[in-house]
Image (spheres, rainbow, N blue to C red):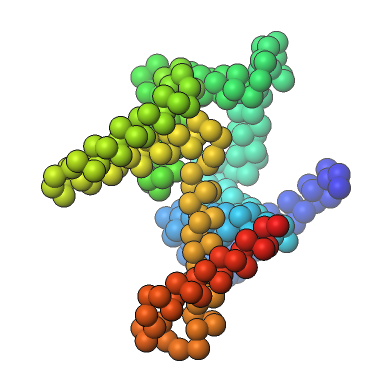
Amino acid sequence: MNPNPEESMAALRHLLGIMNELRIKCPWDQKQTFESLRHLTIEETYELSDAILEGDLEEVKKELGDLMLHIVFYSKLGSEKNAFDIADVINGVSEKLIARHPHVFGDVIVENEADVKRNWELLKLKEKGKNQGVLSGVPNSLPALIKAFRIQEKAHGVGFDWDNKEAVWEKVEEEIAEFKESQNFDNTENEFGDLLFSLVNYARFIGINPDTALEKTNKKFIKRFEYIEANAGKKLKDMTLEEMDAYWNEAKLIDSSNYN
């Protein structure tokens, strides 16, 4: 399926026209601000994430449309403040892509994906200026698990990383031992954080996105727990743990058969 540039531009113009009408005629749209849309944008982003993890491309398409609406909405708000418009947004990201891909649009030579990522981080740091730190580009509001992953990726981008996965796993084992030996709540919480950080680091080192892995486990748990609720024939509070475990194991067997 090859995109048609003319159709794409026509579709964008149509959406921009709709947004202009909404800001003039719709009471709800008239009242929206950057701040009022922020939490809705976060919600839409997570809905897109869910659709991707479910492998539902039809839903991915719909959620991308919702996010596109938000981009157009923010751009409209920016134009009303004479700050920027949709053209500025698109041109800005186009210029960024060209600048950060000198191996495509310039004469820089790369050997692999790792070189590309390393160049990207170094160029990004250069763009921010010498007074900006390597980790300054990690948003403060990121969820902690994703933030840990991005911190480690950025440190890797400038060469601050372990030599091999065996050394990383040794660090995990070291943190497990320290966690087991912790004596009070504050110390235990501290060590648990260190353990999680080291596990995230190991996941990154072997090519696993820990947030994706954990979310898949969340979904798996929900599915199996709902199986118990749907098939037990009585309320969970009236069941023994052994009874619930029996249904849990049935759900696990169903999952296993689906994987084969």
For the C terminus, give its image quadrant: bottom right
The residue most toward the bottom is 234
Residue 99 drawn above or below residue 58: above
Please state the horizontal and vertical placement of residue 143, each as a whole percent of the image: 40, 48
Residue 36 drawn above or below residue 75: below
Whether residue 101 is visible here, answered yes or no, is: yes
Please state the horizontal and vertical placement of residue 239, each as a whole percent of the image: 39, 83
Whether residue 65 is visible here, answered yes or no, is: no
The residue most toward the left is 184
In the picture provided, is 171 more to the left or to the right than 40? Answer: left
Residue 48 appears in which quarter of the rendering?
Answer: bottom right
In the picture provided, is 30 more to the left or to the right than 103? Answer: left
Residue located 37% across and 86% down the image: 238
Please state the horizontal and vertical placement of residue 45, each as a whole percent of the image: 54, 54
Nearer to us in this view, 174 or 222: 174
In the picture provided, is 217 more to the left or to the right than 71? Answer: left
Nearer to us in this view, 51 or 205: 205
Residue located 36% across and 19% down the image: 131
In the picture provided, is 51 more to the left or to the right than 129? Answer: right
Please state the horizontal and vertical placement of residue 205, each as a whole percent of the image: 50, 31
Marker count (numbered): 0
Residue located 49% across and 64% down the image: 221
Residue located 53% across and 33% down the image: 206
Nearer to us in this view, 244 or 66: 244
